[in-house]
């Protein structure tokens, strides 16, 4: 018997719901970080490059965790999900070590 990616409608709805919530959260982070960065850059008269990097990094990390969590719902992709979430953790650890020297 052929394996299905989505075992039932509940799994599909949960997967799509997690993806939708991820997009909403990432969009909210992007919106609020844009506002914050515009104020900070004009107030401090600073170079926006490091701040833009931080903004893109945070939004990318939100997407990576959200997509990894969505794949974790699917039984067929649990290994991929664990890999994505582990990668997100490693990337966050590297960023904590690198970003203080850039800002």
Image (tube, helix red, strand yellow):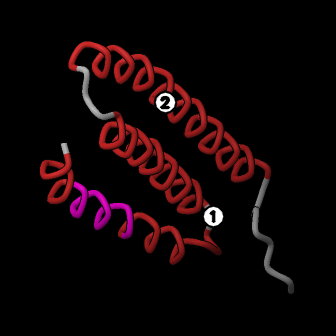
For residue 33, side relative to residue 44 (left or right): right
N-term mark: 2 or 1: 2
**In the image, which disc is placed on residue 74?**
1
- The relative height of residue 90 versus residue 19 in the rendered view (above or below) is below
All told, the count of numbered labels is 2
Q: In the rendered view of the protein, which quadrant contains the C terminus?
A: top left
How would you rate the neighbour count of disc 2 (Cα within 10 Å): few for under 14, some for 14-19, many for 20 or more? some
**Can you say whether 79 is above or below 17 in the image?**
below
Q: Name the residue located 51 percent from the left edge and 35 percent from the top edge.
A: 26
Residue 47: % across, % down: 29, 34
Residue of label 2? 30
Q: Residue furthest bottom?
A: 1
Residue at 28% of width from left, 57% of height from top?
Answer: 92
Above-or-below relation of 59 to 42: below
Which span of residues is magenta-colored?
87-95
Classify residue 58 by image quadrant: top left
- Which of 22 and 41 lies nearest the eye of the viewer? 41
Q: Secondary structure at mark 1?
A: loop
Which SS does the magenta portion mostly show?
A: helix
Whether the magenta-drawn stretch holds residue 91 is answered as yes
Left/right of residue 53 with respect to residue 25 in the rendered view: left
Measured in 3D between alpha carbons, the distance from the residue under mark 2 to the one under mark 1, in whole angstroms, is 28 Å
Query: Splitting the image into 4 quarters, where does residue 4 fall?
Result: bottom right
- Going by the picture, which residue comes out furthest to the right? 1
Say which quarter of the image contains residue 17.
Answer: top right
Quadrant of image for the N terminus: bottom right
How far across and down, in percent of the image, does residue 40 sit? 28, 19
Query: In front here: 21 or 6?
Result: 21
């Amino acid at each position: 018997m052929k394996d299905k990616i989505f075992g039932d409608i509940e799994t599909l709805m949960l997967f799509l719901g997690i993806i939708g919530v991820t997009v909403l959260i990432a969009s909210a982070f992007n919106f609020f970080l844009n506002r914050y960065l515009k104020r900070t850059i004009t107030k401090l008269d600073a170079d926006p490059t490091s701040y833009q990097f931080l903004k893109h990094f945070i939004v990318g990390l939100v997407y990576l965790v959200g997509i990894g969590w969505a794949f974790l719902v699917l039984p067929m992709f649990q290994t991929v999900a664990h890999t994505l979430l582990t990668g997100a953790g490693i990337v966050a650890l590297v960023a904590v070590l690198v970003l203080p020297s850039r800002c």
